[in-house]
Image (tube, rainbow, N blue to C red):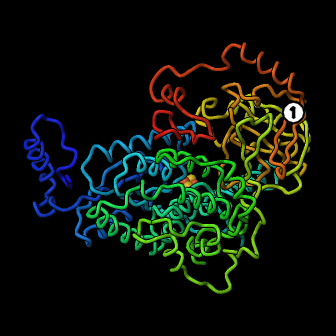
Amino acid sequence: MTKGLRKGLTSYGDAGFSLFLRKAFIKAMGYSDDALERPIVGITNTFSDYNPCHGNVPDLIESVKRGVMLAGGLPMVFPTISIGESFAHPTSMFLRNLMAMDTEEMIRAQPMDSVVVIGGCDKTLPAQVMALASTDIPAIVLPTGPMVAGHHKGEVLGACTDCRRFWAQHRAGTIDVTEIELISGRLCPSIGTCMVMGTASTMACIVEAMGLALPMSATAPATHADRRRIAEASGKRAAEIAISDAPKPSNLITDASVRNAMIVLQAIGGSTNGLIHLIALAGRAGVKVDLEAFDQLGREIPVLLNLKPSGTHYMEHFHHAGGLPALMRELTAFLDLDAPTISGGTLGDAIAQAEQVPGQDVIRSIATPLKKEGAIAVLHGNLAPRSAVIKHSAASPNLLRHTGRAVVFESVEDMAARIDLPDLDVNADDILVLRNAGPKGAPGMPEAGYLPIPLKLARQGVKDMVRISDARMSGTAFGTIVLHIVPESAIGGPLAVVRTGDRIMLDVEGRRIELLIDDAELESSLAAWKELPPQRESATRGYAKLFEEHVLQADQGCDFDFLLRGDS
Ligand code: FES
């Protein structure tokens, strides 16, 4: 088999010349022939001044390189796109598939026998694992790790659960400008990913549960020495799998590991975004995520992790309580313990090494769960013919069965313009509806599903309302919020024809979301909608055009249709 520098030669029509030229140029960097004969481990560099969640990437790269060289390999660092959640316009989800394509193509284009992908901020790990599934060369995932927790006036803070809570208090007039500025300097006290169970933490747990990353990779804080030791170990293991040419992502992304990931997603109180990303990365490997099975697991698997926003603790506490192996030990009755991992053993082997930490309250047992059901429910009904989701572990129990009057916003812009108007016709038991915020509609399916409580209600002390949309929501948010309605309104899903004043029924226990009008009226409204002129201008060029023409719906992972494998 062709290895090392001889892999993927540039096409000059003469293989010998191609290798000669490649060596001649790379020797400009001072490499010896001995170094250039070693197995090559590629390492992605996703450092960016725009991405504080990746602020430790240079340090991690140094540690990975050390591990690679200790095991006799040659580390080669190369840049890829980096996406920082709050610096991505219009939304990071718009760029996830671009990063996946960039990462995939740069792995294919350059000679490497294995690769370490280093990522962390919400869309980066999904993009990288999608790329790995498509290239299928031996690979290991290294999350950047969570920030340490913040503190303000004796209270422990988490980005971004508390970002939203404090901002809501500022909107309601209970926190002034001076204090909110002070808080903005305390919410993110170190580099690393959000330290609550947002999408970044969720995806880090999913990749570890699927055996794509070493044990404890999901939880070690970004600034902790453990993180750099895990990086060194990841480099060492990457050199070993470069030599053995196994395992490959296709050996690890299987029906069994995807089901294990679904179980963990429910048990950690994971982000709804995690479900979209899991569908996408599994789809690249030809594995289908069954939403009904996922929902059924949610009825059987309780939330065991006492972490914000479902619970009270933070990722560093999870790490010190034994991390994901200790949590999965509580789930052994459900998990497929024979699933292989990148370490060379099985998931059962990783769990057997889990630390016992006496007296901790972060990881609950099955007998004493945080919530008796899992984090996420899948809903159906005439408003969501294919599906919708709700993270009911982080919702108000009294709103999980609720019927109310719809107050409709046509788009994110319409919502921003009107939600705080003093004369907005809205009451606390109404249901806020946002449309045209799905994958094609916005475009990019922004995290706008967490509609703010209208100012006049916030000032009356209203903290939660039922909100429904075809948008996404940050995993760090709390609220009774129905998301990912499929089909989205921009392609004629029933959300498109809801009118202010219509009544909507949410029943999470019954897994229903219904517009309370009769079928004939709904059908004639949808038929009339189809005759309307386009609601917005289509993209005419570039990536936006590619995105609009090829992005799939949320229940298909929002991947591009031409990037899936098989019939998934
Ligand atoms: Fe990057 Fe939260 S903003 S992980």
The percent coordinates of residue 345 (x first, y second) are 43, 72
Q: How many marks?
A: 1
**Residue closer to the observer: 555 or 236:** 555
Q: Quadrant of the N terminus?
A: bottom left
Judged left or right of residue 397, residue 84 is: left
Judged left or right of residue 372, residue 516 is: right
**Residue closer to the observer: 285 or 184:** 285
The percent coordinates of residue 534 (x first, y second) are 66, 16
Inspect this view and state whether residue 104 appears.
yes
- Is the residue at mark 1 in contact range of ligand 1, meaning its CB lies under 8 Å from it? no
Which residue is tagged 1?
424
Tell me the residue at 84%/37% (across/down).
Answer: 514
Judged left or right of residue 524, residue 46 is: left
**Residue closer to the observer: 423 or 500:** 500
Against 455, residue 67 (above or below) is: below
The percent coordinates of residue 179 (x first, y second) are 71, 58
User: Ligand 1 shows up in which quadrant of the image?
Assistant: bottom right
